[in-house]
């Protein structure tokens, strides 16, 4: 059996809004092995981003548990989750969330520096990743000086800098034009093959989701496999 990098076991998430309780997720289970490519689709408001935040330890479930590389992040403190996330999980967002005052190189190197890597080593690794994603000549540019596609490729490089076992991506092409979105997905698939990193991608783009190994749909708080 392939090594599991992520296990979600009967996850539930309920939010309290005044006198109301809103159940967003109901007994969601998911297993992700090394190098898997998994898409999660669903309508707006179906809980896709909530699920991704639980999988990445950005939030905690109301019930159930999440294991990343065999470690139960649901039982960890916020600081412990942050440390594990830095070591084992890369995050990619629709709006990239790059730090505007830093260059592409500095943005990509940041997670490595947070992990305690020497600045020269972190910079060298960041430069190599930017070269790999086609931005070797843009490493000294700040986000405001780059196109949307370039910013998203920088965000992908940043997510991979610590060689995580798992990358979680929330609508990573949702803010891009069709051609740039296609190029971004192609890059992610190439890096998946080269580095063996598992990808779990939330997306509205059905035609792109179908290129993944497995497609799951989240509806009425329940997760079911489509292919």
Image: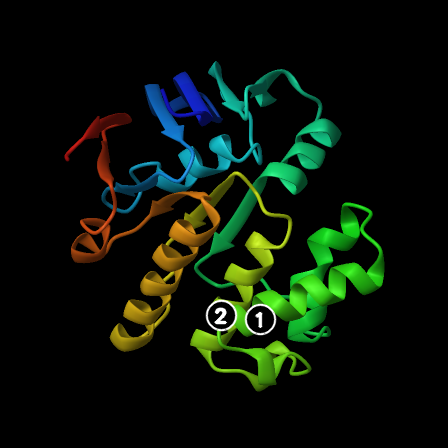
How crowded pointer 1 is (Cα within 10 Å; few <14, some 14-19, many 20+) is rated as many
Q: Distance between the residues labelled 2 and 1?
A: 5 Å
- What residue is at 35 percent from the left and 56 percent from the top? 189
CB contact under 8 Å: marks 2 and 1: yes
In the image, 51 versus 216, the foreground residue is 216
> In this figure, which colouring scheme has been used for the structure?
rainbow
Q: Which quarter of the rendered picture does the N terminus lie within? A: top left
Identify the element where label 1 is drawn: helix
* The label number, if any, that marks residue 155 in the structure image: none
Name the residue that disc number 1 marks. 130
Residue 133 numbered tag: 2
Q: Which residue is drawn at 66% across and 65% down?
A: 126
Q: In the rendered image of this protein, does residue 147 appear above or below residue 187?
A: below
Q: Where is residue 171 in the image (x, y as percent from the top left)?
A: 37, 55
The spot of residue 6 in percent (x, y) is 46, 27
Neighbour tally class for label 2: few under 14, some 14-19, many 20 plus, Cα within 10 Å? some
Left or right, 44 with reference to 18: left
- The residue at 48%/82% (across/down) is 147
Q: Is residue 142 left or right of residue 199?
A: right
Q: In which quarter of the image is residue 227?
A: top left
Image mark count: 2
Image location of residue 150, percent across then percent down: 49, 76
Element class at badge 2 = loop
* Residue 174 visible within the image: no
Q: Where is residue 193 in the image (x, y as percent from the top left)?
A: 38, 51
**Would you place residue 50 above or below residue 177 in this image?**
above
């Amino acid at each position: 059996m392939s090594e599991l990098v992520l296990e979600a076991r009967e996850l539930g998430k309920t939010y309290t809004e005044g006198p109301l309780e809103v159940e967003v997720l109901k007994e969601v289970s998911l297993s992700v092995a090394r190098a898997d490519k998994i898409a999660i689709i669903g309508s707006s408001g179906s809980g896709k981003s909530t699920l991704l935040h639980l999988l990445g330890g950005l939030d905690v479930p109301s019930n159930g548990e999440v294991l990343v590389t065999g470690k139960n992040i649901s039982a960890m403190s916020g600081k412990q989750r942050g440390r594990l996330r830095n070591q084992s999980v890369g995050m990619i967002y629709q709006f990239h969330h790059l730090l505007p005052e830093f260059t592409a190189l500095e943005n990509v190197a940041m997670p490595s520096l947070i992990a305690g890597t020497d600045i020269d080593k972190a910079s060298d690794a960041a430069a190599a990743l930017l070269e790999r994603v086609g931005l070797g000549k843009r490493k000294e540019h700040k986000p405001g000086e780059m196109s949307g596609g370039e910013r998203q490729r920088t965000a992908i490089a940043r997510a991979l800098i610590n060689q995580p076992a798992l990358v979680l991506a929330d609508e990573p092409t949702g803010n891009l034009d069709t051609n740039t979105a296609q190029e971004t997905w192609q890059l992610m698939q190439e890096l998946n093959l080269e580095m063996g990193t598992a990808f779990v991608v939330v997306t509205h783009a059905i035609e792109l989701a179908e290129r993944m190994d497995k497609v799951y749909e989240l509806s009425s708080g329940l997760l079911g496999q489509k292919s």
